[in-house]
């Protein structure tokens, strides 16, 4: 049989898809100065999670309806979709109507999704689309069965192809008992949608234009369909701080499970926080209370002991990040030891096999291969060569009150404890810097440098005192 139907139309599966994401609402129950869809979950705004999933459907058009804090929301959308503005928020039907112009000339299927369902998976959207297309419906709604249906639109099933959605505010006592509810995600035939939107009215308890009324209108033609979601937690809309916390817990569980399946061990998974953009290699071990944010990357066989905060930090294979390390924008090479309690600030670069120990702060500095700064140091705006030993309490004095200056330390230099390197200054390769030195000018390679602070002793002085 030919792939074309008898009427010569393309089979439904080849129809183009447009996606409309509704993100104009205020989210009053968040009680926040920030629009609801901008609140972060696992390191990304709620809306970005939704857009990440809808993009997997390869829609030919993507539209986001913005309204409250339109500019900030549009900035999150970026190039991913066209933004249209709904100036007044008069309901979900009114919101989709705002996208009408952006959908002009489009024929195919239009998927409508709320911008506040961050746990949504593309696989579920694909199933909805398949159901919509296979049932040749004008409108298909994704429903879910929940323990507590209050607040949701209830699904009133009538006969095959016919049902209605009644909003909580409009529902009678018996209708409120129904536990199958509207998830707020739909597929529509584009022509039906664009034509019927203008027939919506505000004749309901909330005086809103209900998008849900379109389901009844499709039912009148016997062409409405529904798909019951397998996992309702995925469709959870975030509308309060409690909802945000619950969604975050579910997202963390999902992310951590995903990494476990890829060979990462978590010693106390419930206490770990990961951003969606984190990547980890096989056989990493993540201890309790570890927070990996931004685009942090761990190579293979890295160990992060615990209570560490790494943001936008890259860690090479087999490195050991010990307890209590804070790193932001740092690059840690292979087989490095950091911590406990080290602070790596932006542009800290630790070469392979280097050691950075307790209470050492490194900022905008390169530490060469195999070099060590194990105790109580500040290394800022410095380039440190290979196999250098930086003694306890060494400080690069990089700031003169007006500007920052660089310190350069050559390969194999031994820096004694309690040394100050007053920048700008260069210490050549193979130098010895005596303990307690204040180095204020450049030192040629192979030199010993010390300050003349000769030890003085007065025998028996204490007794007299
Ligand atoms: C809607 C459904 C309800 C469903 C519920 C699922 C209607 C009438 N009701 O409820 O059946 O159970 O979702 O969560 O559709 N929005 C706009 N502009 C507006 C109004 C809303 O962009 O004028 C956006 C919101 O930002 C949000 C989404 O639409 O992303 C859903 O709005 P919300 O107010 O949470 O949904 P309800 O109308 O209460």
Image: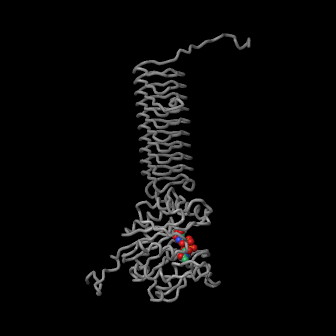
270 and 172: which is toward the camera: 172
Quarter the N terminus occupies: bottom left
In this view of the protein, which residue sits in the foreground, 344 or 31? Answer: 31
- Above or below 352: residue 36: below
Is 390 on the left or on the right of 151, as rendered? left
Where residue 33 appears, as percent x and y from the top left, is 59, 59
Residue beneath the point at 43% across and 60% down = 78
Question: Can you give x and y, in whole percent of width and height, for residue 223 in the image?
Answer: 44, 86
Q: Quadrant of residue 432?
A: top left
Q: Residue at x 65, y 10 (%)?
A: 458
Name the outermost residue toward the right: 464
Q: How is the image coloured?
A: one colour
Tell how many labels. Answer: 0
Q: Quadrant of ligand 1?
A: bottom right
Query: Based on the displayed image, in which of its 4 quarters is residue 148 positioned?
Result: bottom right
419 relative to 171 in the view: left or right:
left
What is the x, y in percent for residue 58?
37, 68
Q: Along the horizontal axis of the image, is 460 left or right of 152?
A: right
Give the answer, above or below, for where 108 lies relative to 280: below
Q: Is residue 235 visible?
A: no
Which residue is painted at 47% across and 61% down in the image? 74
Quadrant of the image containing the C terminus: top right
Q: Which residue is depicted at the point 42% across and 71% down?
A: 19
Q: Is residue 117 visible?
A: yes
Q: Residue furthest front?
A: 87
Residue 441 in the image, given as x and y percentages of width and height: 46, 21
| View extreme (left): residue | 2
Say above or below: 243 vs 331: below
């Amino acid at each position: 049989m030919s792939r074309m139907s008898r009427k010569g139309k393309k089979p439904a599966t080849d129809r183009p898809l447009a996606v409309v994401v509704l993100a104009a609402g205020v989210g009053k129950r968040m009680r926040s100065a920030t629009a609801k869809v901008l609140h972060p979950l696992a390191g990304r705004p709620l809306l970005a999670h939704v857009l990440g999933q809808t993009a997997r459907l390869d829609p030919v058009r993507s539209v986001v309806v913005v309204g409250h804090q339109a500019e900030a929301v549009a900035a999150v959308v970026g190039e991913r979709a066209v933004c249209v503005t709904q100036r007044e928020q008069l309901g979900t039907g009114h919101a989709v109507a705002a996208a009408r112009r952006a959908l002009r000339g489009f024929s195919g299927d239009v998927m409508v999704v709320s911008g506040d369902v961050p746990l949504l998976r593309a696989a579920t959207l694909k199933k909805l689309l398949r159901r919509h297309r296979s049932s040749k419906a004008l409108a298909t709604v994704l429903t879910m069965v929940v323990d507590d249906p209050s607040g949701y639109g209830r699904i009133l099933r009538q006969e095959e192809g016919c049902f209605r959605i009644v909003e909580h505010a409009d529902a009678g006592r018996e209708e409120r008992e129904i536990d199958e509810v509207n998830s707020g995600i739909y597929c529509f035939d584009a022509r039906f949608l664009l034509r019927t939107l203008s027939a919506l009215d505000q004749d309901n308890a909330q005086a809103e234009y209900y998008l849900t009324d379109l389901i009844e209108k499709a039912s009148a033609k016997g062409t409405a369909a529904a798909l019951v979601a397998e996992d309702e937690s995925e469709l959870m809309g975030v509308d309060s701080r409690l909802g945000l916390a619950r969604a975050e817990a579910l997202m963390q569980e999902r992310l951590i499970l995903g990494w476990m399946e890829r060979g990462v061990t978590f010693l106390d998974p419930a206490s770990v926080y990961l951003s969606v953009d984190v990547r980890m290699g096989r056989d990493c071990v993540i201890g309790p209370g570890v927070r990996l944010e931004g685009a942090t990357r761990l190579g293979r066989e890295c160990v992060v002991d615990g209570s560490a905060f790494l943001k936008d930090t890259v860690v090479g294979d087999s490195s050991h990040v010990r307890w209590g390390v804070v790193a932001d924008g740092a690059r840690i090479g292979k087989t490095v030891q950091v911590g406990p309690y080290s602070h790596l600030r932006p542009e800290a670069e630790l070469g392979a096999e280097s050691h950075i120990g307790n209470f050492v702060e490194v900022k905008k500095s390169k530490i060469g291969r195999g070099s060590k700064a194990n105790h109580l140091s500040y290394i800022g705006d410095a380039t440190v060569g290979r196999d250098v030993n930086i003694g306890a309490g060494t400080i690069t004095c990089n700031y003169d009150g007006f500007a920052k200056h660089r310190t350069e330390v050559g390969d194999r230099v031994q820096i004694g404890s309690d040394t100050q390197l007053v920048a700008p200054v260069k210490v050549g390769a193979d130098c010895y810097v005596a303990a307690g030195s204040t180095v204020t000018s450049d030192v040629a390679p192979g030199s010993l440098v010390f300050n003349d602070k000769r030890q003085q002793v007065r025998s028996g002085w204490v007794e007299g005192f």
